[in-house]
Image (cartoon, rainbow, N blue to C red):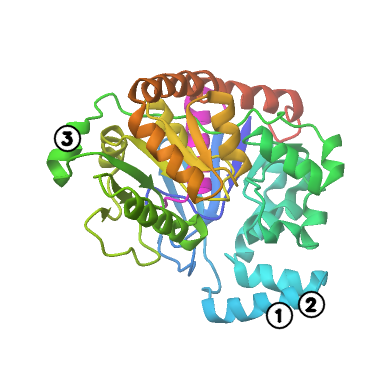
Amino acid sequence: MKICFVVQRSGLEVNGGAEVLARQLAEQTALLTDHTVEIATTKAIDYVTWKNEYEKDEEELNGVLIHRFPVVNERDQDKFNKFTAKMLEAGDNVEIQEEWMRLQGPETPALIEWLSANKENYDCFIFMTYLYYTTYYGLKAVGDKAIFIPTAHEEWPIHLKMFEEMFRLPKFYYYNTIEEKILVNDLFPWTKDYPDNNGTGGAGVEVPANVSAEGFRSKFGIEGDFMIYVGRIDENKCCPELFKYFREFKDRNKDSDLKLVLVGKEIIDVPKSDDIISLGFVSEEDKYNAIAASRFLVLPSHFESLSIVVLESMFLSHPVLVSGKCDVLRGHCRRSNAGLYYRDFYEFEGSVRFLLREKEISQQMGRNGRGYVDENYSWKNIVARLDRILKDHFSGDGKD
């Protein structure tokens, strides 16, 4: 079969969660099946500006042909923010919401035209993430030949009326978690009648064999106990709340030498403190080494549709501490028995104390996490499930 993934950004230089998942799922499907797999995307790397940075129209990467299309308008953040306020004041005005979508971007009419022109040349199109122009207009172009991976979570945009039509268009729904399926079925009740994967999706977790905690400590000179945060250091990831809770924890637990180490691009300022260490964007090797050297991983985000880094920490047999306000993260903890979750500062404080004090239990939680990931998030199992979907629901729809 001939399969095309459609995603807003794609490339080794792109590190967004949904974008990395789309690329890896495409690459693993090409590697582990006989299907021809391609990606259609934009020339943008940065999701804030959508500036065209990739020069080539086509590129082959890890066995997958990538078609790149130009973004016609970079995003003006001030203009976009003002229009967002106007849109929210206008209520359920779909016309204004669609103008918001155009400004949200990445506006790539050439990609949509290409999808329309090539609909019959592919057996299936797999769209990643509900929020962007490429999915909103791309689904309209190919509709009944589409698998839709919404990566949906509770946030205000998903309640916009414009999305009601879009969530009627795909042929098949592919959810990353059970919690995502429940959310989409609640918001768009007709999706209960669409075929889906019953929430058994997700991403495969691959971690190199030579992960070294000591390698991290020697390279960065960090000693003692620390919790690790991995990801964009951003308000949308609830990092200000993490900084506040960590500072209050240290003020109330003055005998603790615990540090907070941050790995990822700084979108907001990080507080200046001896026990808060921001390393910026690091290599994959350094990231895995950092997780291995930590006592546990912390993720304060209220809005996650899967969270690869939580699964990576579990794979490395390290417990996680996550926001209980995120259904997906809370679900991972409950199903795996490999993490704790908090809903306020006092639960955060109690959880940190427990993970530092109860070393044997923390180690057992780490072992639980490794088993959870091995069973549910190996690429072999994920691709096998996707292959069955393709053969059962899309075989024979496309051009031989």
Decide if residue 33 is on the left or right side of residue 146. Answer: left
Q: Count residues near mark 3 (Cα–Cα under 10 Å), then give few for <14, some for 14-19, many for 20+.
A: some
Identify which amino acid the numbered label 2 is placed on.
Answer: Ala
Specify the segment rendered in magenta.
Answer: 14-35
Q: Count residues near mark 2 (Cα–Cα under 10 Å), then give few for <14, some for 14-19, many for 20+.
A: few
Decide if residue 348 is on the left or right side of residue 302. Answer: left
Q: Residue at x 36, y 22 (%)?
A: 363
Identify which amino acid the numbered label 1 is placed on.
Answer: Lys
Tags 3 and 2 touching, CB below 8 Å:
no
x, y percent for residue 308: 47, 38
Q: Could you give the CA–CA distance between mark 1 and mark 2, rounded to whole angstroms?
A: 6 Å
Q: Count residues near mark 1 (Cα–Cα under 10 Å), then give few for <14, some for 14-19, many for 20+.
A: some
The disc placed on residue 33 is none
Mark 2: secondary structure: loop
Regarding residue 92, the answer to whether it shows in the image is yes
Q: Earlier in the sequence, mark 1 or mark 3?
A: 1
x, y percent for residue 263: 32, 50
Mark 2 — residue?
Answer: 90
x, y percent for residue 278: 28, 55
Q: Could you give the CA–CA distance between mark 1 and mark 3, rounded to whole angstroms?
A: 51 Å
Please say if 96 is above or below 223: below
Q: Nearer the viewer, residue 5 or 182?
A: 182
x, y percent for residue 137: 71, 59
Mark 1 — residue?
Answer: 86
Mark 1: secondary structure: helix
- Dominant SS type (magenta): helix
Please say if 35 is above or below 81: above
The image quadrant that residue 33 belongs to is top right
Q: Does the magenta-highlighted stretch encompass residue 264?
A: no
